[in-house]
Image (cartoon, rainbow, N blue to C red):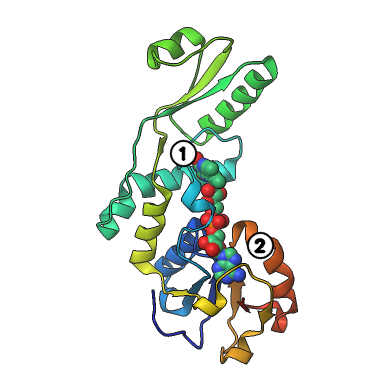
Amino acid sequence: MASEFPTSARVVIVGGGVMGVGLAYHLGHEGWGSDTVLLEKAELTSGSTWHAAGQVTHSTSSFGLGKCVDYNIGLYSGGLEAETGQPVTWHGCGSFRLAYTTDEMDWLRHTLSVARALGFNIALVGPEQGAKLHPFYNLDGVLGALHTPDDGHVDPTNVTMAMAAARVRTVSASSANAGPPTSCKPPMTNGWSRPRKARSPASMWSTPLAPMRARSANGLACNCR
Ligand SMILES: Cc1cc2nc3c(=O)[nH]c(=O)nc-3n(C[C@H](O)[C@H](O)[C@H](O)COP(=O)(O)OP(=O)(O)OC[C@H]3O[C@@H](n4cnc5c(N)ncnc54)[C@H](O)[C@@H]3O)c2cc1C
């Protein structure tokens, strides 16, 4: 993390979880790296990112989310590690999504149609085929399952740290700023020049943060403590 607090930035991102760091990383790829600052009140990944199991699955019934997931699997399964040299512990073990009711089977069929339209490797299998693919599964009561062999899981902390190492200018909050956000100062009072854009992927802290952004000058970035 940077030791000196920067005084200007075109983009300020509040929150150093996988969302904030991912946004900064991709802005870096778009040529905005030196214009972007990420503010984190504690440590990178110290929010919900640290707790995540890290499963990434093609089994999604949304076209937009499906494209994001497919991109992420490509990034985590090779691209990020090749770029940064930092292991992200991708395990491409595949996954199942089980259905126990006819309504759930309908939802699996819908998900299957979306995934096929997007060209994903996916199949709707019955319990017998499921047992062959995964002999240790307890399939009592299972009507069917979506099998997505290209899925996997990753260590979310490693992914975030790899993206941060690649392209992110991060500023850790000083000890005076640590703790839940309770008040907010407009950036200019702290010597900030006005950023053009502010983003707050602060996860469960977003609710207290939102009114602070609104109260800050022009609703732009703020220094919260
Ligand atoms: C038990 C569990 C299991 C999960 N499993 C999965 C899974 O298998 N697959 C999956 O896709 N998702 C999973 N998730 C969901 C996933 O963890 C979250 O969607 C993701 O981590 C959200 O990332 P984020 O960057 O938005 O938030 P966070 O990781 O919470 O990051 C927010 C950051 O903002 C910082 N912050 C807050 N307020 C301020 C402020 N005022 N100033 C500066 N910094 C601030 C915090 O310190 C924190 O670091 C799981 C979640 C949990 C809890």
For residue 83, which quarter of the picture?
bottom left
Which amino acid, mark 2?
Ser
Left or right, 22 with reference to 64 = left
**What residue is shown at x 69% (from left), y 76% (from top)?**
183
Where does the C terminus fall, quadrant-wise? bottom right
Percent from the top left, x then y, of residue 190? 58, 89
Which amino acid, mark 1?
Gln
Q: Which mark is residue 55?
A: 1
Few, some or many C-alpha atoms within 10 Å of disc 2 (few <14, some 14-19, many ≥20)?
Answer: some
Between the C-alphas of marks 2 and 1, the distance is: 24 Å
Percent from the top left, x then y, of residue 54? 45, 42
Where does the N terminus fall, quadrant-wise? bottom left
Left or right, 149 with reference to 12 = left
Q: Quadrant of ligand 1?
A: bottom right
Judge by depth and name the residue closer to the eye, 174 or 90: 174
Which is nearer the N-term, disc 2 or disc 1?
Answer: 1
**What residue is shown at x 34% (from left), y 65% (from top)?**
165
Percent from the top left, x then y, of residue 159? 39, 53
- The residue singled out by tag 2 in the image is 206
Left or right, 103 with reference to 36 = right
Above/below status of 170 relative to 129? below
Percent from the top left, x then y, of residue 5? 46, 84
Q: Is mark 2 within 8 Å of ligand 1?
A: yes
Name the secondary structure under disc 2: helix
Q: Is mark 1 within 8 Å of ligand 1?
A: yes
Few, some or many C-alpha atoms within 10 Å of disc 1 (few <14, some 14-19, many ≥20)?
Answer: some
Above/below status of 96 relative to 24? above
Above/below status of 25 relative to 37? above
